[in-house]
Amino acid sequence: MMISIRGEHLEVTEALRDYVDKKLTRLERYFEAPLTSDVQVKLSVIKGLQSIEVSIPLTGVLLRAEERNTDMYASIDLVVDKLERQIRKHKTKTNRKIRQDGGKRDLFKVETSAVTYVDEEEDFELVRNKRFDLKPMDVEEAILQMNMVGHSFFVFSNMDTDTVNVVYKRNDGKYGLIEPAI
């Protein structure tokens, strides 16, 4: 597993690099073949909190986890735990689909130990459904509307591109825009 580590507003020491490498290489046991793409790790300090972002590109899926804590080593431990849960969940879904489709081998290693994992797959329950007319507006007006209703995102019809867009409030207090790729 090739791990690319970079620091933002933080010097990546050799001890940090070794700890991240040691923790993330634990994830290799879940894969049948070695990963062919680089694992991207970004260590940063945001508003006094130690933050780590990890992206693991796999075939057909991108595993991504982010964690913030007052201690960088605790953040690393927490993000590895999140990634392990995601991998187990994805592994279960993928192997179930392969078995249903009559596949011959699993993409992930099959554990033969007596220990069984509790499937942490959540039941997604839709509790509310809203319908509303999309009023054409520009991005600035959409941000104002979002702030007026007190939500963290707002769906609108972009008058400049004639597409449905989403503006959202980021953790750093700034705003983001999601546009469809056309």
Image (cartoon, rainbow, N blue to C red):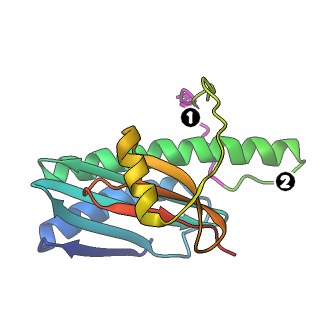
Image mark for residue 113:
1
* Residue 111 % position (x, y): 60, 41
Give, as a single range, the part of the protein colored magenta: 108-121
Q: Amino acid at mark 1?
A: Ser
Please count the marks in the image.
2
> From the viewer's perspective, is residue 72 above or below residue 6?
above
Please indicate whether residue 77 sits to the left or right of residue 177 in the image.
left
Which residue matches tag 2?
104
Q: What residue sits 52% from the left and 76% below the top?
A: 37
Marks 2,1: beta carbons within 8 A:
no
Indicate the quadrant where residue 27 lies. bottom left
Please indicate whether residue 18 sits to the left or right of residue 141 in the image.
left
The one of 174 and 57 positioned closer to us in this rendering: 174
Residue 3 visible in rendering: yes
Indicate the quadrant where residue 53 lies. bottom left
* Residue 133 % position (x, y): 66, 45
Instruction: Please tell me how crowded label 2 is: few (under 14), some (14-19), or many (20+) other residues with Cα within 10 Å.
Output: few
Please indicate whether residue 159 sits to the left or right of residue 53 in the image.
right
Task: Determine whether the residue tagged by mark 2 lies in a helix, strand or loop.
Answer: loop
Location of the C terminus (image quadrant): bottom right
Q: What residue sits 27% from the left and 62% below the top?
A: 20
Q: What residue sits 54% from the left and 70% below the top?
A: 35
* Residue 74 % position (x, y): 19, 46
Q: Amino acid at mark 2?
A: Lys
Residue 55 visible in rendering: no
Location of the N terminus (image quadrant): bottom left
Image mark for residue 60:
none
